[in-house]
Image: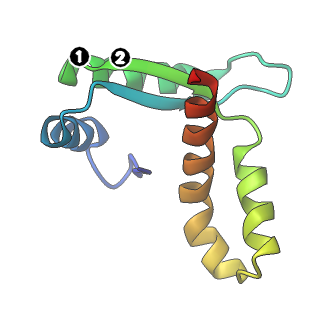
Amino acid sequence: MVLDRRQVDAVAEIAQLCAEYEVETVVIGLPKSLSGEEGPSAAMARELGAAIGEATGCEITFFDERFTTVQAESALLEGGMRRRQRRETVDKVAAAMMLQGFLDSQS
């Protein structure tokens, strides 16, 4: 799921979904620099994770999200999607790619 924190209370929305679907683990994308270092965006992701963990009691797992937007954009271009549609879809596809990477790393 992709939430725009400027439009919704992400913590409350996620807490509601976690309760509704009996979620045990929440995976949050961790934006890192190309060198692998964490910057201000990663700190914000970790703060969000802490708030979600506190609100839900769920285990919070962070997963490197480097290159997912580029990969998603490339896949959508390859699929012939128009620019406007890509802008509306790229974050969702990138989130799905990040989650798949996390799931693949667990096996």
Which image quadrant for residue 50?
top left
Amino acid type at circle 1 is Glu
CA neighbours of label 1 inside 10 A, class few (<14), some (14 to 19), many (20+): some
User: x, y (%) of residue 42?
Assistant: 59, 23
User: x, y (%) of residue 102?
Assistant: 58, 30
Q: Residue at x 81, y 62 (%)?
A: 74
Which image quadrant for residue 25?
top left
Q: Residue at x 59, y 23 (%)?
A: 107
Q: Is residue 25 above or below residue 37?
A: below
Secondary structure beneath dot 2 equals helix
CB under 8 Å between discs 2 and 1: yes
User: x, y (%) of residue 22?
Assistant: 18, 33
Q: Residue at x 71, y 26 (%)?
A: 32
User: x, y (%) of residue 60?
Assistant: 39, 19
Please give the residue where the numbered disc 2 appears in the rendered image: 50
Q: Is residue 67 above or below residue 31?
A: below
CA neighbours of label 2 inside 10 A, class few (<14), some (14 to 19), many (20+): some
- In the image, taking residue 47 as reference, residue 100 lies left or right, namely right
- In the image, taking residue 58 as reference, residue 26 lies left or right, namely right
Secondary structure beneath dot 1 equals helix
Residue 54 — which label?
1
Which image quadrant for residue 30?
top right
